[in-house]
Image: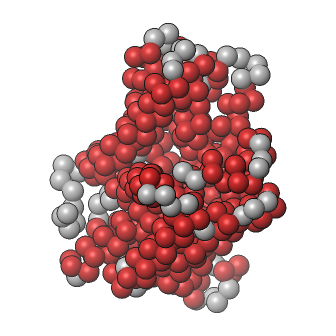
Amino acid sequence: MERSLLGARRATYVYFILCGTLMGAWVVHIPAAEERVGISHATLGGLLVLLGLGAFAGMQVAGPLTDRLGARVVVPATAVLCGATLVLPGLARDPWALAGALLVFGACNGALDVSMNAHAVHVEKAYCRPVMSGFHATFSVGGVLAALVAAGATSAGAGPVATMAAIGGVSIVIALVSVRALMPAAPVAPPAEGSVGAGEFEKTGDPKEAPSPARAARRSMTGRVWLLAVLALMVMLCEGAANDWSALHLRDVLGASTSTAAFAYGTFAAAMTVGRLLADRLAARFGSTAVLRHGAITAAVGITLVALGPWMWTAFAGWALFGLGLSGTVPQLFSAAGHADPAAAGANVSRVAGLGYVGMLAGPAVIGWLTHVVALNHTFLLLTLLCVTTAVGAGVLRTKSDAVPRDEPAGIGH
């Protein structure tokens, strides 16, 4: 049992790396696609919205499908589709073709994202301790891997289409090889507190005729999941804003050179990766509520330092604190959504991930709109407000098992 569980955990790492690599392989080739199709930055921005819309739609389909068919079926299937569709944006020669390619690739990537997170929830449940943040850290590693591969391929003279096709093909092979290690189904466990087990409906055969306490419990669980989704929207809006505006802040507000300004995002991303590598141990010791609350407070301090600090070093320190604080928030929210009702882990994760993804897409646009009213650095105070609100709402994560900190993690070791 321990060997099979360890294998499932390693396989989940593989799929997270694949998802990050496939998305990263598209991101690093965006400039080449823009030049080949012959579109402006504004048109590209509109087309990238289609990528997000496709991802959102894929998430909503894959979540319930994962609950019905099992992650062992849906995860590799979506990984294969994602690998196969990666080359489509590279093949596009006009805006309409690129729009369709991004919509399809986004849907496949979103479906993989939700299904692998649902499987990660089941692995975490079997481990009886937090492991979700580690999975999200390997997603970031996948993005770095894609950048390195693309840089090496370009140096060797390979074009974007060949590079994307090669990455997609290798990803398909790895996805198929890793199937056997995945968990065959969600681990059998009593319904989580606030959820309703199937047995409660079997007595009548009709959910509408379920006892009133059962209906109330299900409504309470659904409401809790949507609260988690709102928190995810806020923290992922913050992450999206950092992705697109951190470098511009250093260049336009503090007068840094373009090369120096690039380190702002690098500092944020590096801090986020390190934080995710540490967040599981912190959640095991202090509880996921503490990780979300104190992480959001740390992020609020960091982004306030960015907004109000007049020096370069305060900006770098602020972006580092912002990344470190945000690093553990999304994994805790995804994990809580999946554990709210193990029988509907995929559907619940898709709700939280979907609304969170809307926030990530909206973040850059919201900041851009606010720059018409106030200075760029002062727009970041909105992110401070969102982080403080998240800290206040962190109690929605609290359960009986999370109420008391644990001195030693339970379950199977690394």
Quarter of the image with the C terminus is: bottom left
Name the one closer to the observer, 90 or 99.
90
* Residue 401 visible in the displayed image: no
Q: Is residue 383 above or below residue 376?
A: below
The outermost residue toward the right is: 96
Is there any visible trace of residue 100 in the rendered image?
yes
Q: What percent of the width, then of the height, locates residue 119? A: 44, 71
Q: Residue furthest front?
A: 157
| Residue pictured at 64% horizontal, 89% vertical | 205
Instruction: Estimate the x, y position of residue 72 in percent, counting from the top left.
Output: 45, 82
- Tell me if residue 367 comes above or below residue 88 in the rendering: above
Residue at the spot 41% in from the left edge and 62% down from the top edge: 17
Quadrant in which residue 68 is drawn:
bottom right
At 56% from the left and 21% from the top, the residue drawn is 251
Q: Quadrant of residue 109?
A: bottom right
Where is 248 relative to 280, above or below? above
Residue at (43, 79) in percent of width and height: 173
98 relative to 410 in the view: left or right: right
Question: Could you say where residue 43 lies in the image, as x and y percent from the top left?
Answer: 79, 46
Pick the front one: 135 or 122: 135
The quarter of the displayed image where residue 307 is located: top right
Image quadrant where one finds the N terminus: bottom left
Residue 97 x %, y %? 77, 64
- What color scheme is it? secondary structure
